[in-house]
Image: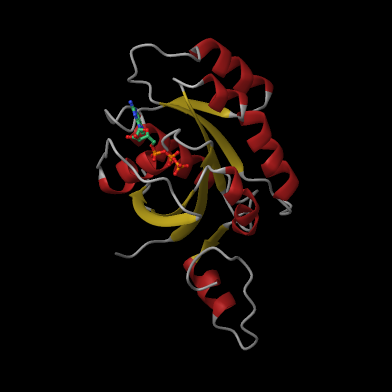
Amino acid sequence: MNYDYIFKIIIIGDSNTGKTSIVKRLCENKFMSVCNGTIGVDFSTKITELENGIFVKSQIWDTGGNIKFKKLLRQYYKGVACIVVTFSLSSSDSFQSVPSWLDEIKNNIIDDNPPLIILVGNKSDVQHRIVSREEAEKFSKNNGLIYIETSAKINHNIKKLETCIVNNIYNNMDKSISGIQSMENHLKDNFNDNKQSRYNCCWLC
Ligand code: GTP
């Protein structure tokens, strides 16, 4: 399928918060109640049509939340247009970890144009949530983040998350070149004479 732009997106956050499940729901509309933890980093793609008829391809890098993969993650931040930070609404620890994930981003983003950061409170379907909407919203406001609650399990707000990601990246494209290239530029950069990788955003780079 043809597309006009490629957006690089990374999803990070503690183990067990549902990163893989969100990506699986978004890309394949599937949910698995038993998942193996992600080892290192996995990769999926999704094509979305914007309201103006433009097609964008999202390359979504799903990362293992285990602490031992944090160092590995650093090489994936290059050229990223959006970082989704997840926590579980049923885990106070995962919410307490969010500031350390934000520090991780701050310490590793070297591009001039910082990526869009979206905080996702996943598992909104649980009967007894531990993290309230109010505290998550307050935290997001104080840190200048967009906040969305999702459930990969019951497919709550997953489409909203997708729309939020691609529209925000697309609408800010003129101001934020990093991580976003037209295919023409992308191919030109990768098939020129001195094949320097510039973006590290896909199999071409
Ligand atoms: P790591 O790969 O270890 O970093 O984990 P992860 O963040 O990718 O979590 P994963 O998607 O593997 O999900 C962990 C567990 O939570 C699995 O048992 C999922 O079925 C479950 N889970 C994921 N999303 C939801 C959700 O929205 N609601 C509920 N109730 N459970 C969920």
Ligand 1 located in image quadrant: top left
Q: x%, y% of residue 75?
A: 63, 59
| Residue located 36% across and 46% down the image | 36
203 relative to 162, above or below: below
Q: Tag count in the figure?
A: 0
From the viewer's perspective, tell me whether residue 94 is left or right of residue 178.
left
From the viewer's perspective, tell me whether residue 87 is left or right of residue 163.
right
Q: x%, y% of residue 9?
A: 51, 50
Quadrant (top left/top right/bottom left/bottom right) for the N terminus: bottom left
172 relative to 144, above or below: below
Front-most of residues 187 and 109 = 109
Front-most of residues 7 and 38 = 38
Q: x%, y% of residue 69?
A: 58, 50
| Residue located 58% across and 66% down the image | 200
Q: x%, y% of residue 196?
A: 65, 78
* Farthest-out residue, bottom: 193
| Residue located 52% across and 26% down the image | 147
37 relative to 45, above or below: above
Q: In which quarter of the image is residue 129?
A: top left
| Residue located 67% across and 43% down the image | 105
Identify the image's colour scheme: rainbow, by chain, secondary structure or one colour.
secondary structure
Quadrant (top left/top right/bottom left/bottom right) for the C terminus: bottom right
123 relative to 179, above or below: above
